[in-house]
Amino acid sequence: MIESEPQGRGSAQHLKDVALGVRGSVARQSLLVFLALLVIVPAYFLLITSFKTTADYGNNKIGLPVEVFFGNFVTAMRGGRFFLWFLNSVILVVGAVALSTLVAALAAFAFARMTFRGRNPLLAVITSLMVIPPVVMIIPLFLFFSKLKLTSTYPAAILVYAGMVVPFSVFLLTNFFKTIPHEIIESALIDGASVTGILTRIMMPLSAPAIVTLIVVNALWVWNDLLIALVLLPNDHMRSLMVGITVFGSRYSADVPVALAGMLLASIPMLLLFVFGQRYFMHGMVSGALKG
C-alpha cells in the first residue's frame, strides 16, 4: 500500500501530461490550419473566378466554373496597357534588386569581415530600419524627388525601392558571410587575392543560397508594391503592373472575372521565380537568420 500510492500518483500525473500535450498539439495544428486557410481561400477564389464568365460568377461566386472560360485573360491583356505596365515592373524589379544586392554585399562584407570603429552600432542602426513602415516616408520622399524633378522616372523609384530593401539585405548577408570559414579568406590573402577578389570570387559564390533568397524576397516585395509606385510614378505610361491592374480593375468593376484574370497573370512571374529559387530559398533564410 505504501508503494502503490506513489505509483498511482505518477500514473495520474503522466496521463495529465499526455492530455496537456495532446491539447497543445491540437491547438497548434488548429492554428496552422487556420493560417493555411487564410492563404488558400483567396488563392482558390482568384483561380476559379479567373476562369468564369460574368454570368457564371453572378450565379455562383465560390463554386467551380460551369465551363472553363479563357476569354477573361484576352480581355485583361487588351483592356489596358498590360504589357507596358509589365515591362515597367520588370525594369523596377531588376534595377532595385541589382542595386540593393550590390550595396548590401559591399556593406555586409565590411560588417562581417572588417574591423572599424562604430561597426556594431552602425549595423544596429541599419538593421533597425527594417521596422520602419514605408508609408511614413512616402510624403518626404515625394517632396524630395519633386524638388529634383525626378517623379515619374525610373531612377527615383529604383532608388527608393533599393533603399527600402537594403536593411534586410545587409542583415541577411552579414549573418551569412560570418558563417564562411575564415581560413578560406586567409588562404586567398596569402595567394595575393585583393579585397574585391575575395568578395567576388569567394564570398559571393559561397553565399549563393543567401543571394537567391534576397533576389526572391526583394523581387516579390518590389513587384507587389502599390504605394510607392502609385505616388512616385503617377503617369499612366510609367505605372507598374500592380498599379495598372488596380486602375484596370476599377474600370472593369462590374466584370470581376476579368480583373482577377489580370491579377492572376501578374502573379505568374513571381510564382515562377519562387519555384526556380526554392532550392536555395529555405537554406538561405535559415542560415542567414540563425547563424551569426
Image (tube, rainbow, N blue to C red):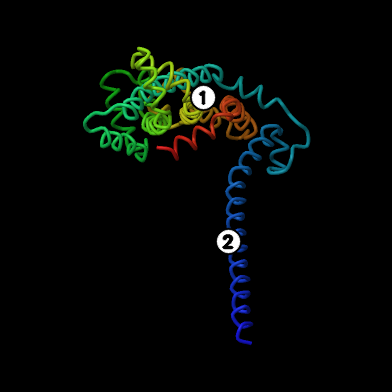
Answer few, some or many: residues within 10 Å of disc 1's Cα (few below 14, many 20 plus, some between 14 and 19). Answer: many
Q: Is residue 264 left or right of residue 107?
A: right
Q: Which residue is mark 2?
A: 24
- Residue 234 seen in the figure: no
Q: Which mark is residue 241?
A: 1
Task: Decide which of 212, 116 is in the foreground and name it.
Answer: 116
- Residue in view at x 31 percent, y 32 percent: 139
Does residue 88 lie above or below 141 as drawn? above
Residue 188 falls in image quadrant: top left
In the rendered image, residue 101, in percent from the top left (x then y), is placed at 41, 23
Name the element at disc 1: helix
Name the element at disc 2: helix
- Residue 193 seen in the figure: yes
In the rendered image, residue 152, in percent from the top left (x then y), is placed at 38, 19
Amino acid beneath label 2: Gly
Residue 80 falls in image quadrant: top right
Given the current orientation, which residue lies at the most extreme right position? 67
Task: Decide which of 21, 233 is in the foreground and name it.
Answer: 21
- Residue in view at x 78 percent, y 37 percent: 66
User: Dividing the image into 4 quarters, which one contains the C terminus?
Assistant: top left
Task: Decide which of 75, 292 is in the foreground and name it.
Answer: 292
- Residue in view at x 45 percent, y 35 percent: 288
- The mark lying in front, picked from 2 and 1, is 2
- Residue in view at x 33 percent, y 36 percent: 129
Q: Which mark is residue 152?
A: none
In the rendered image, residue 246, in percent from the top left (x then y), is placed at 51, 31
Residue 194 falls in image quadrant: top left
Q: How far is mark 2 from mark 1, CA to CA?
A: 44 Å
In the rendered image, residue 113, in percent from the top left (x then y), is placed at 33, 27
Given the current orientation, which residue lies at the most extreme left position? 117
Amino acid beneath label 1: Leu
Total number of numbered discs in the rendering = 2
